Image (cartoon, grey):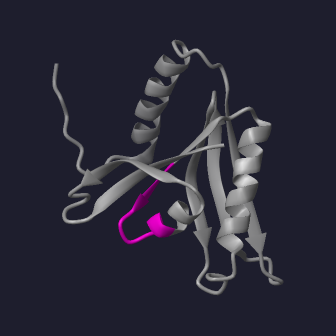
Amino acid sequence: MDIEVIENPEQALVDFLSQQISDFNWARWEVSERLPFAMQVKNDAGEVIAGAAGRTFGDWLLLDTLWVSDVLRGQNVGSKILKQVEALGRQRGCKRCLLDTLNFQAKPFYEKQGYQVEWTQEGYPRTGCKYFMTKEL
């Protein structure tokens, strides 16, 4: 058996490996469904200028992305999107939300919205840190 190290793997291989783990997990988890979602805000030209994406999974709302363009920052757009994300999670039966943010991103924003740091990954990727935050819905 040869173990091949691939410096720049094709996305197809990465996707295949990820799918294998996903298939393994789904065959064993107590929940049978993971529902993705996305939200977007477009300007008059049809360009996306804010949005969010994630998935609901059992009792959890997993927020992967919440982004607001520089043009809209400071206008409560992020707060409004987050409230809609949380409402969707509650509609889907979620009890908690999990997200992560980097030290230079949105930790103060999420804290104002009621999120608490559960754990911090120090030295990420070298001198920064990554915060894993949760909120009861």
- Where residue 79 sits in the image (x, y, percent)? 67, 67
Residue 50 to residue 55: above or below: below
Q: Nearer the viewer, residue 75 or 135?
A: 135
- Where residue 53 sits in the image (x, y, percent)? 64, 53
Q: Residue at x 53, y 68 (%)?
A: 109
- Where residue 78 sits in the image (x, y, percent)? 65, 69
Q: In which quarter of the image is residue 83?
A: bottom right
On whether residue 6 falls in the magenta region, the answer is no
Residue 22 to residue 73: above or below: above
Q: What stretch is highlighted in magenta?
A: 99-108
On whether residue 107 falls in the magenta region, the answer is yes
Q: Residue at x 50, y 27 (%)?
A: 22
Image quadrant for the C terminus?
top right
Q: Is residue 8 visible?
A: no
How many discs mark residues in the rendered view? 0
Image quadrant for the N terminus?
top left
Q: In which quarter of the image is residue 71?
A: bottom right
* Extreme residue toward the left, this view: 2
Q: Nearer the viewer, residue 25 or 3?
A: 25
Q: Nearer the viewer, residue 77 or 32?
A: 77
- Where residue 88 sits in the image (x, y, percent)? 76, 46
Horizontal side of 55 relative to 92 (left or right) equals left
Q: In which quarter of the image is residue 20?
A: top left
Q: Can residue 62 be seen in this view?
A: yes
Horizontal side of 84 relative to 24 (left or right) equals right
* Extreme residue toward the bottom, this view: 71
Horizontal side of 136 relative to 83 (left or right) equals left
Q: Which residue is drawn at 25% across and 59% down?
A: 125
Residue 47 to residue 121: above or below: below
Q: Residue at x 73, y 77 (%)?
A: 47
